[in-house]
Amino acid sequence: MAEGLSVRLRQRAPIPLEVALEVAPGELLALVGPSGSGKSSVLRAIAGLLRPREGRIACAGETWLDAGAGLSLPPQRRRVGFVFQHYALFPHMSALDNVAAALGHWPQAGRAARAREWLARVHLAGLEERKPVRLSGGQQQRVAVARALAGEPRALLLDEPFSAVDQVTRRKLYRELAELRRTLPIPQILVTHDLDEAALLADRIAVLHHGRTLQTGPPAELLARPASPLVARLLDQRNLFEGTVLGHEPERTWIAWAGRRLEARPAPGFAPGARVAWLIPEAQVRLLRRDPPGGRRPRDNVVTGTVVEMLALGGRVQVTLAPDGRAEAPPIAFSVAAHIIGREGIAPGAELRLSLLAAGLHLMPPEPA
Amino acid sequence: MDWQALRLSIALASWTLAALLPLGLLLARLLAYRRFRGQGWVEALLALPLVLPPTVIGFYLLEGFGAASGFGRAWEALFGHRLVFTFEGLVLASILVNVPFAVQPMQRAFEAIPREVREAAACCGMGRWRIVTRIELPLAWPGILTALVLVFAHTLGEFGVVLMVGGSIPGETRTIAIAIYDRVQAFDDAAAGRMSALLLAISLVTIAASYALTRRLGRRDG
């Protein structure tokens, strides 16, 4: 991937890092992970603000870092656009001067006009003379984005750029970023701990934990097929259980769980009798109607249980179910549209039947005991 | 009124300022942004003049500047006259004594600039010198101004060290603070009173002006 951004980092101290990332031109990679997982350090290393012990970073065919050869370009020569978490605008300069500060490569006479164009592109026309303290959080973020892009960077790095604004503004800024990205031919990395944000904006997600990239892939694939229970948990997957492999058929694998036989996607890699971790994404859990029109049909993996908890979030309700009414069994979580609740008589203590779709039931190596 | 002493005091303060502006900026920036071994000791050493009695500082400077020391002999060989009891010696002593008054406000001002702001400047393609002139100095300016005012006012008022290193030679080392002491010793309370009032007024005006200017600079960011 000579045209894109390629990152390999390795060090033990001061922050442990073991990172491998490839980002194509025009692609947005979200780097997700809990606080302290090293997300910001990775961005800082790419920008040249932190020098890792070992590693190689190349972008657009140019080597930025080759620790083995003692090569490390300073930030000024890497030309990255960096949007900091709290924007790091120059407080003594107007919005216009903040953007113009990144235009050192432009002829002096054209800088103000060019900076004006950038501010207009991020919908800040008319606020050119404002100092950062007199701009709202969302406006400051836009200035930071304009400043980062004005330098015609070879990569765009965004460090939690939405964490300091309110939710309404955040949604607006999501749309603006998605719009701006369409014409941006450079690799982009977004650091975030918000999984919904990552899934919404990113082409691919890389999961970082204790400085290690655990898995990288498109959001849907990562949610459906996490490489390990740890990745699943980091992606906030709640229906994570352990069972035993019973056997394989060409189209399916059978596992035993809580005294049941469950059908899973074929996973011939796991030997019969082996312990496995398994996951069913919430979207793959179907609520079975009490009296379906046309009578009952055979369904995948039917589980009955008792509702133990209900949480209304927007138009949907998060339901937690204790299988077979046993409170000690690991519960299954799913969500249904709010209007279903009344129709199906869902209430704490009610008995429900669920189907765990076999096509969504994913097997993984168990966590070391 | 000893106008000569006042002129001497102002000359001493001006030379001290001229030396400590670049030196203080260099030291303050180094201490604010670099981490090195023994930094705590260096900072303690620079802060010593704040806590030591002027007589102790004066004593060591006298020893260090005197003909018995290598530095004192080298000076005499180079310039043909002694360093102690001269205006040059006084300037050198004043610079050393004022280091903490210059460095500390400047260092705090540099430290108050968020690391990300300086990093953002580097990512914008600004070189190191450009970051200093376009970002750091404008943001640290109120602290730098405070430092300069403190140094100026403190030099006008310095008494102990000046007396130890300079004595009280009219036109050479007798500053206004020393002149006031001489007048009191000579029971010339009227002259001492006039000079004290003048010194009080100069100090008050300088500090008040710096506060007002700092406030205006603060508002400029708004």
Image (cartoon, grey):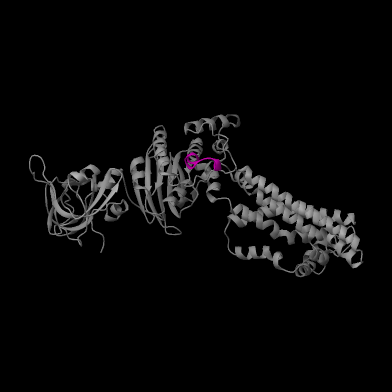
Nearest to the observer: residue B173 or residue B150: B150
Say if A342 sits above or below B190 in the image.
above
Nearest to the observer: residue B213 or residue B193: B193
Q: Is residue A137 magenta?
A: yes
Say if A343 sits above or below A181 in the image.
below
Nearest to the observer: residue B181 or residue B62: B181
Q: Quadrant for the N terminus of chain B, please.
A: bottom right
Where residue A342 sits, quadrant-wise, is top left
The residue under the point 47% across, 31% down is A121
The residue under the point 57% across, 42% down is B126
Residue B185 in the figure: left or right of residue A269: right
Residue A99 in the figure: left or right of residue B179: left
Where residue A221 sits, quadrant-wise, is top left
* Residue A258 x %, y %: 15, 59
Q: Is residue A281 magenta?
A: no
* Residue A266 x %, y %: 16, 48
The residue under the point 78% across, 64% down is B71
Q: Quadrant for the C terminus of chain B, please.
A: top right
Residue A220 in the figure: left or right of residue B168: left
Instruction: Please indicate, yes or no, whether residue B5 appears anywhere in the rendered image.
Output: yes
* Residue A75 x %, y %: 51, 45
The magenta segment: A132-141
Instruction: Please indicate, yes or no, whether residue A3 appears anywhere in the rendered image.
Output: no
* Residue A364 x %, y %: 23, 54
Farthest residue in the left direction? A295
Nearest to the observer: residue A297 or residue B193: B193
Q: Main secondary structure of the magenta part?
A: helix
